[in-house]
Image (cartoon, coloured by chain):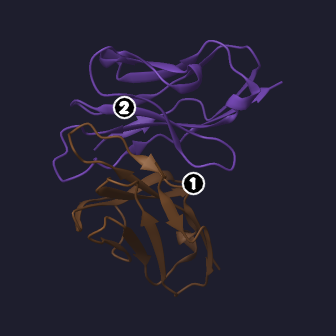
Amino acid sequence: KAGVTQTPRYLIKTRGQQVTLSCSPISGHRSVSWYQQTPGQGLQFLFEYFSETQRNKGNFPGRFSGRQFSNSRSEMNVSTLELGDSALYLCASSRSQGYQETQYFGPGTRLLVL
Amino acid sequence: AQSVSQHNHHVILSEAASLELGCNYSYGGTVNLFWYVQYPGQHLQLLLKYFSGDPLVKGIKGFEAEFIKSKFSFNLRKPSVQWSDTAEYFCAVNDPMYSGGGADGLTFGKGTHLIIQP
């Protein structure tokens, strides 16, 4: 079974721009979560989508948003980019068939903001 | 809110040495517990997980972890490490009773960078 895929793998943007990252979950998985990984803050939860609805949200400003499509694919958008948004953005998917779920991670999109 | 502490940020061992990486969490309720590993240039992979039952869980590549509820700990162990175990190790927790939809967001520790010297 194919794993979680993320596109693009690398991005370079300038301050003030916006960016959209894409994630395709493992086939059959209906929940998609997004995380930000930085050297200083480590791995931090951004938000989770299930059935096209944001169900859970971490402590990030409103510039970070996302959506999920009917095929469970998800996109994450960051508007008005800041230098501090440079990070590895990870997507994880899970089945969501029960209350004990395992999240499987994709390779990430590395974003550099100049 | 949950928090996870990994006591050792950097660990250097020789091949064949025994390994124990500490992980403590702070959360009063029931938790799911995970160890993930990130090998150089690769993505996060699940090493092992604890949901319920036997507190000693075995994972891939000879790793195991023990959940000690009274100590809020979930330490990772391996009796004899190999050079290929060089990686970043992350302990993570989430709420098994999360009812929002899929899996609850994971709270990660800061990670332990393990270097195995040949």
Say which of B25 and A75 sits in front.
Answer: A75
Q: Is residue A104 above or below residue B75?
A: below
Q: Which residue is mark 1?
A: A40
Q: Local crowd at mark 2 within 10 Å, few (<14), some, or many (≥20)?
A: many
For mark 2, name the chain.
B
From the viewer's perspective, tell me whether residue B2 is left or right of residue A15.
left
Q: Secondary structure at mark 1?
A: loop
For mark 1, name the chain.
A
| Farthest-out residue, right | B118
Alpha carbon of mark 2 to alpha carbon of mark 1: how far? 23 Å
* Quadrant assignment for the N terminus of chain B: top left
From the viewer's perspective, tell me whether residue B65 is left or right of residue B9.
left
Which chain does purple denote in the image? B
Name the amino acid type tagged 1.
Gly
According to the rendering, which colour does chain A have? brown
Q: Which mark is residue B33?
A: 2
Both marks 2 and 1 on one chain:
no
From the viewer's perspective, tell me whether residue A13 is left or right of residue B47.
right
- Residue B21 at what x, y percent from top left? 56, 24
Say which of A70 and A49 sits in front.
Answer: A70
Rendered residue at 83%/24% (across/down): B118
Rendered residue at 32%/53% (across/down): A28
Name the amino acid type tagged 2.
Leu
Rendered residue at 20%/40% (across/down): A98
From the viewer's perspective, tell me whether residue B32 is left or right of residue A107.
left
Discs 2, 1 touching: Cβ within 8 Å: no
Q: Closer to us: mark 2 or mark 1?
A: 2
- Residue B60 at what x, y percent from top left? 53, 26
- Residue B62 at what x, y percent from top left? 57, 19
Say which of B84 and B4 sits in front.
Answer: B84
